[in-house]
Amino acid sequence: MSELVPVHTDQAPAAIGPYAQAVVADGWVFCSGQIPVVPGSGELVEPDIAKQTDRVLLNLAAVLEGAGSSLADVVKTTVFLADMGHFAPMNQVYSRHFGEHRPARATVQVAALPRGSLVEIECIARLSR
C-alpha cells in the first residue's frame, strides 16, 4: 500500500477544516478545493468573478508547487460556481492561467460556497518529472 503524504504550503490559504491542502499518492496530487482567500491575511477577495478566479488559481498553483507539481501537470479540474452566469469571465481567467494546456474539466453550479465565494476549484495532477 502506498503512503499518503499530506501537503501544506504557507503560499496558499491554510485548510479551514479537518483536511489537507492536497495529498500526494502514487505519483498523483489530489488538491482540495481552493477558494479566493489571500494567503496570510485570510481575507476573501472582493466579489468579482474574474478577480476571485485569478486568486483561486494562484492558490491552486501554490499548493501544486508545494506538492512538486504545477498547473501544467493538471489532468482534471472541477470548477464550482455560485452562478453559472459567471462561466464566461471565469473561463477567460482560467484559460489565461492554463495557456495551451487543456486538462479535463467539469463545471457545476452549486447552491453556495464557503465564505460566500463565487468560485471554488479542485484538481488532480501528476507529480512533475
Image: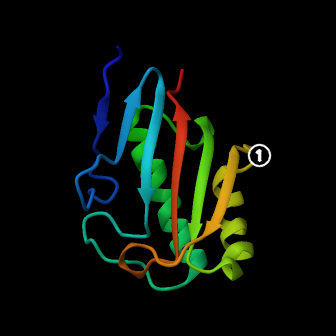
61 or 87, nearer to the observer: 87
Is 111 placed above or below 37 here?
A: below
Q: Quadrant of the C terminus?
A: top right
2 or 52, nearer to the observer: 2
Alpha-carbon neighbours of circle 1 within 10 Å: few (<14), some, or many (≥20)?
few
Q: Residue 29 in the image: x percent, y percent? A: 46, 34
Q: Secondary structure at mark 1?
A: loop
Q: Quadrant of the N terminus?
A: top left
| Residue in view at x 24 percent, y 59 percent | 17
Indicate the quadrant where residue 66 lies.
top left
Find the residue positioned furthest to the top: 1
Which residue is label 1 attached to?
Answer: 100
Q: What amino acid is at disc 1?
A: Glu
How many numbered marks does the figure carry? 1
Indicate the quadrant where residue 35 lies.
bottom left
| Residue in view at x 37 percent, y 70 percent | 37
Q: Which of the colour schemes (rainbow, by chain, secondary structure, one colour) is used? A: rainbow
Find the residue positioned furthest to the bottom: 47
Query: Left or right: where does residue 5 sit relative to residue 65?
Result: left
| Residue in view at x 44 percent, y 74 percent | 113
Q: Residue 88 in the image: x percent, y percent? A: 75, 74
Q: Residue 63 in the image: x percent, y percent? A: 40, 46
Query: Left or right: where does residue 110 sit relative to residue 7?
Result: right
Q: Residue 71 in the image: x percent, y percent? A: 57, 43
